Structure formats: structure tokens, C-alpha cells
Amino acid sequence: MQSALGSSGVAESGPPPKSTSAQDLQHIQAKMQPGHKPGLLQTLAAWYYVLSFALGIYCWIFCIWLCTKLPLLWPALVAYTVYLYTAGVAPTQDGSWPLRLRNLALWRWLAAYFPARLHKTVDLPPDRSYIFCAHPHGIVSFSIWLSFATWALGFNRLFPGLDCRLLTLAINFRCPLLHSYLLWNGLCDVSKRSCLNLLRRGKSVAIAVGGGTESLYAAPGKNDLVLSRRKGFVKIALRTGASLVPVYCFGENNTFRTANELPPESRIRKVQRRMTQLAGFTLPLYFGRGFFLPWGFLPFPVPLDVVVGEPVHVQKFEGSESSGEFDALVDKYHAQYVVALQKLFEDNRHKFAKGEADLRLVE
């Protein structure tokens, strides 16, 4: 089995493996469990989750519509918006809100749709903080959400004593109603200040290291990651002494067929890259199955297996971040983390990624 590690211990990208749309569909069909058919509640849960990625837009539309019907509510909406940008910022950076929504039946239905499972390889003592680095992002991150924003996969039972917060973009907390929804699921702001604050309070955090950019590489049977230049999480670990925990979400890239199956020189792929450059966010194009039709925006019910690996322990650095010593340590621990992630992938691919491409760092 060919390894994706170069002589330096850092994964190399290499030429992308060739595939066709028909091959990707065959791969998805091969991954589906024989006889597994999601029920109505499971299907509705998956439909809700996919739609929820635009929840911020829905919340703004609803609030504005409500104010047009009841004009007396306009001052309340203005005051609420001011709160979101002022006092409402603090709870997004300290994890102080109660986790009221993590144990909803909705999340258990969503997990049963695929089905999704969380696997532990080692015990993680709760007397220290951890940065759970999850890969790949996929299109809408089913695996990461179920593992770290809910208790549907049993994170609280597998890792007792750990208070882990999934991190997301700060702009998501500036939307009315969505602010509370995310906080009650235990999410926090992914900014540097938030990370340092949470880890220094003894909490752990979970990050999709590749971010939205990685969704542009999501395709069935592929394991392409955006990691080579992503070193901010290592810097946070050095400032706090938190351990880096590799997490690989097997099956996440099989949940949808995407425009990423097209060649990089295609018009659609060029438009996607151009939009990323101009707007700063990505717009992945994808489709799956439908309620009654063979195509739609429901994910394919393929197994999702999230494997939590052995941590890379990082010694806290007390010096200046602008020093050459700090930069050298960042590169050192980043290389160690990549090796640990590669090992996690290779140790488990025979169980969860048969017939799939090697792990590659494409950016």
C-alpha cells in the first residue's frame, strides 16, 4: 500500500487520481449497507440538517417578516442586533451557555440515517485540554457536527469529563435566533481569542482544520485535505499546551456527488475558485438523493465512521510568537501531527475506506 508521506514526513499532493461520474456513483452504491433504508424520521432529520446550513438567512428573513407584520417589534430587533455585536460576543468565546440541545432525538435520528459511529483508539484523561482536529470537512460536515456538537454518537460516554466545544465562524453568531441555537449546541467562535480563552479555562475544542476550502475537494472515494499551510491550530496548542488529537471522518466525502468530480479546468470549477478569491467563502455544488426521486439534496445513506486518534502532546511555549524558535516549533509539531494523522488513516482504511484513494495534502 503506497504511502502519501514524503521523505520529510509531510504528505505530498501529487497528481490527482482520475475518476468518472459513473465510477463515483458506483463507489457510493458499494458503500451503502445492504438492507439499510432510513425511516421517515431519519430522512426528515437529514433534510433539516442540510437546510440548516442556510439557517442564518432564514432567521434574518423571519425576523424582518415578523417586524413588518408587527412594527412595534422593530426596536426590539435593533436592540437584539446591537446585543449580538456587543454583550452577546462574550458567551461565544467562553462556552458559558448550557448545552440544552445536544441530546435531542433529532440528532439520534440523523446519526441513524447513515448510520454514523464514533470510535475511540485511546483514552484521553480529562485533566488536560485537547484540540480535536477533524478531517475532512466534506460538504456539510455531518460527521463533525454529530461527533462534537451533539451526544448522538456518545462523545460524553467515550470521553467522560471532557467539555469539548465545536468551533465555527464568528459571523454565524451575529444572526438573530441562530446565536442562541448554536450556543445551546455548545458551539463557540473559532477566533484565536476564543480558542485561547476556552483552552485556558480547561475546556477542549474541535476544529475542521480544512474549513470551507476543503469542501471544494470533497468527492466520493477521495481523501484530499487542506492542511499543508494550516498551522494556526498548532500555534494555539503551543500557547496553551493543549494536545493535538487527529480525527478522521471516514465516509464524509461519500455523502454527496459534487462538481469536484469535474476536471479543474472546467468552467464550473473555475467559477468556484474565482468566487472564493472574490468573496472569501466557498460555494460547493452538490447533489444526492431525493425523497421520491433518485436525485435531490438528501445525502446518500453511507456509513460514517469517525475515528479519534492518539494525541500529539505539545509543550507550552512561553516565549515570543515572533521568534525563530516559535516558528521552528510550529513546523516541528505540524510535521508530527501530519504523521499522526497519516498513521490514523492507514491503520483504519482497511476497515472504513476500502477501495478509496490515498490521503493527500492538496493545499
Image (cartoon, grey):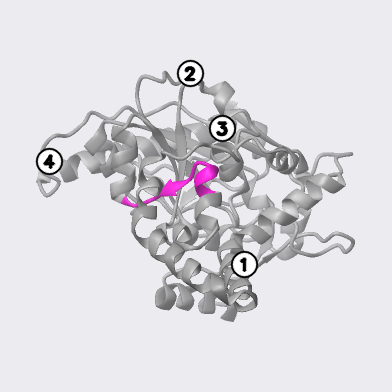
* In front: label 1 or label 4: 1
Which of disc 2 and disc 4 is earlier in sequence?
2
Question: Which of 167 and 262 lies nearest the eye of the viewer?
Answer: 167
The answer for how far apart the CA atoms under marks 4 and 2 are is: 32 Å
Residue type at mark 1 is Tyr
- Circle 1 is placed at which residue position? 58
* In front: label 2 or label 3: 2
* Quadrant in the rendering for residue 332: top left
The answer for how far apart the CA atoms under marks 1 and 4 are is: 47 Å
- Circle 3 is placed at which residue position? 307
Q: Residue 123: which disc?
A: 2
Question: Which of 98 and 166 lies nearest the eye of the viewer?
Answer: 98
* In front: label 2 or label 1: 1
Which of disc 1 and disc 2 is earlier in sequence?
1
Residue shown at the point (43%, 57%) measured from the top left: 169
Q: Secondary structure at mark 3?
A: strand
Residue shown at the point (60%, 38%) measured from the top left: 102
